[in-house]
Image: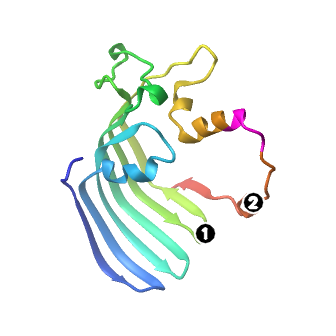
Amino acid sequence: MPSTGRLVFSGKATDQMAEVDVTTTGLPLQLGASYLTGVIEPGLLGTIDSEMHLSRQGTALKLTLAQMRVSDVALQCNSKANCAPPHGPAIGLKGKNNLLELRQLLVKDAVLDTEAQQVKLGSVQLVEPVLGVSRAKDGRMMFEDWLVASQARQSEAKAPAKPATSSKAAASKPWMCSWM
């Protein structure tokens, strides 16, 4: 794993409030790999540069993103059993085990507000996205095998059904997303 990159915090925080500026420079996406292992099988490569401000009062959290640039992104198959690449190099993917490549993802002027349950985006730009797409003989799309939850559902389908439980989240207010 690359050891380069920089994460800088400046500001003040207590157990009830925070006003913090966060800057990342060349931070490898692989640092977050352990957080994705329960969600997705392929590995994530690339780096992130960003400038943001975090504001917290009690349970209310607001993240204001001035800009974020994610560069040289690749979703890479590390396990042939669960996420075998469904394509060949003819469709434009440079890495033989890559499932997705993206030269850059640019996000500017974004705000995430947990109290208002809103996400506002100023602009989002994808630069040179490439994705290999295929369907198995049984009709499943290739990305269904990448999702850890999908693999768990396949295992559960073979096991006896569990009784359904009610969820508070299902009754909660939906999040709003808008372009500024």
Q: Which residue is at a point 40% across and 51% down the rendered structure image? A: 34
- Kindly indicate the quadrant of the structure image that contains residue 174: bottom right
Magenta span covers which residues? 156-161
Q: Position of residue 157 (x, y in %)?
A: 71, 34
Which residue is the site of mark 1?
Answer: 116
Q: Is residue 57 magenta?
A: no
User: Can you name the residue that lies furthest to the front here?
Assistant: 159
Dot 1 or dot 2, earlier in sequence: 1
Q: Nearer the viewer, mark 1 or mark 2?
A: 2
Q: Position of residue 28 (x, y in %)?
A: 27, 50
Q: Nearer the viewer, residue 137 or 120?
A: 137
Q: Position of residue 69 (x, y in %)?
A: 31, 50
Q: Which residue is at a point 58% across and 62% down the rendered structure image? A: 118
Within 10 angstroms of label 1, few (less than 14), some, or many (20 or more) residues?
few
Q: Position of residue 57 (x, y in %)?
A: 50, 82
Q: Give the alpha-carbon distance from disc 1 to disc 2, as whole Å.
A: 21 Å
Up the image or down, 134 lies above or below 120; here it is: above
Which residue is the site of mark 2?
Answer: 167
- Kindly indicate the quadrant of the structure image that contains residue 52: bottom left
Q: Which residue is at a point 63% across and 19% down the rendered structure image? A: 139
Kind of residue at badge 2: Ser
